[in-house]
Amino acid sequence: MRSQLIRGIAVLAGLSLHYIKISLYNAGMEKLVTALKAAGEPTRLRILALLGQGELTVNELVQVLDQSQPRVSRHLKLLAEAGLIERCQEGTWVFCRLADRGPNAALLRVTLDMLPADDEALARDHKRLAQVRSARASSADAYFRANATEWNRIRSLYVPEAEVEACLLRALEGRELDDFLDIGTGTGRMLEIFAHRVGHGLGIDANQDMLAIARNMLARKGIANCQARQGDLYDLPVADNSQDAVLLHQVLHYVDDGEGAIAEAARVLRPGGVLLVADFAPHGEEFLRDEQAHRRLGFADQEVIGWGELAGLSKRSISHLDGGRLTVTIWELEKAGGLGRSRGAAARPEAAE
Ligand SMILES: C[S@@+](CC[C@H](N)C(=O)[O-])C[C@H]1O[C@@H](n2cnc3c(N)ncnc32)[C@H](O)[C@@H]1O
């Protein structure tokens, strides 16, 4: 089946080439032929199938494909030159993702749709990818398990914490917050600072050790309107359109699939609800990967805005809080279709960029 697909792509590429030879020069046609030729090879098709599951580092692709790094890099170079993938260097890691715009995005959608569901090599790759991801998740989980009791201290090491918290509270000023969700709640600090503002607060986290500390804190401080529950941020145990505000505070840089995390957050927001994402602006502090299990070294404004747009959220404001070595960005994104559930005359903060 897969070889038929490759043959099909190769035939299409050949036909297109033939067309170019007999017709006037056409740049669009030449680009299409280059893209089809790049996709029409077994390993490169496997790479496209893997990237169809979300962005991956070169090293992760090497592990999954079980080929040498120079070999995988050659394939990636060809795919990038053909405009089928984008490569993005971040510190010592290179992230690869499928092109998500223009004619090549359409070509990729068709190609990925045509991949046979019963192909053994593809099934093996997906199994290996799941193992690579789960090994990464376990090491991040082990980090949080080992550092749960220290997390409140670690969190405040590199960021202007009081400023960030004041900015988050300001962003939701004047909003009716019956239901508030803190994704990746950790030790529950965000529940603590929002408790007085919300009808009901729910913190979700994958890590039981972090949750134990969060529950302890809620009980100790008598915060009865907030709960902490175990769950996965890609599959929240929360109904569609049920939350007035959702927060992802210092979580995105740990996850494999930022786009997926934001899409899931958007799913549970009510129309007119707000997603606040607080995370680092792009930085070069590689030690955070080695010592604190970070995957991404921060995010450009447009990357998070773009993920929001794909999930039906539009930008309301962006704030940058300079903490010296690291800058924290707060993205405020809103789900369309709200009736403006404001609770008074308080003005929302000015958009800062
Ligand atoms: C850096 S901590 C941030 C905690 C909290 N938001 C704060 O600011 O103190 C990131 C948290 O995300 C959680 N996390 C990571 N991946 C997750 C997943 N897939 N589902 C749920 N929680 C996850 C970790 O267990 C960890 O507690």
Image: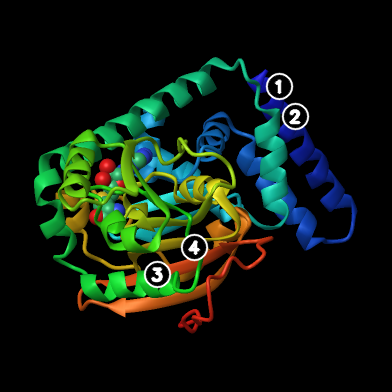
State how far apart marks 3 and 1 are (Cα).
48 Å
Residue 84 makes an appearance in the image: yes
134 and 100: which is toward the camera: 134
Label 2: state its secondary structure: helix
Q: Earlier in the sequence, mark 4 or mark 3?
A: 4
Q: Which residue is mark 1?
A: 4
Closer to the observer: label 3 or label 2? Answer: 3
- Name which of mark 3 and mark 1 comes first in the sequence: 1
Q: Amino acid at mark 1?
A: Gln
**What residue is disc 2 on?**
8
Where is mark 4, residue-wise? 303
Crowdedness near tag 3: few (<14), some (14–19) or many (≥20) residues, C-alpha within 10 Å? many
Tag 3 residue: 330
Above or below for 62 versus 22 = above
| Residue 322: percent from left, percent from top | 27, 79
Q: Position of residue 336 (x, y in %)?
A: 66, 61
Distance between mark 2 and mark 4 Cα atoms: 35 Å
Residue lying at 61% horizontally and 15% vertically, measured from the top left: 118
Q: Nearer the viewer, residue 280 or 274?
A: 274
Q: Is residue 67 visible?
A: no
Say what amino acid the circle numbered 2 marks.
Answer: Gly
Within 8 Å: ligand 1 and the Cβ of disc 3?
no
Badges 3 and 2: C-beta atoms under 8 Å apart?
no
* Mark before the other along the chain sequence, 4 or 1: 1
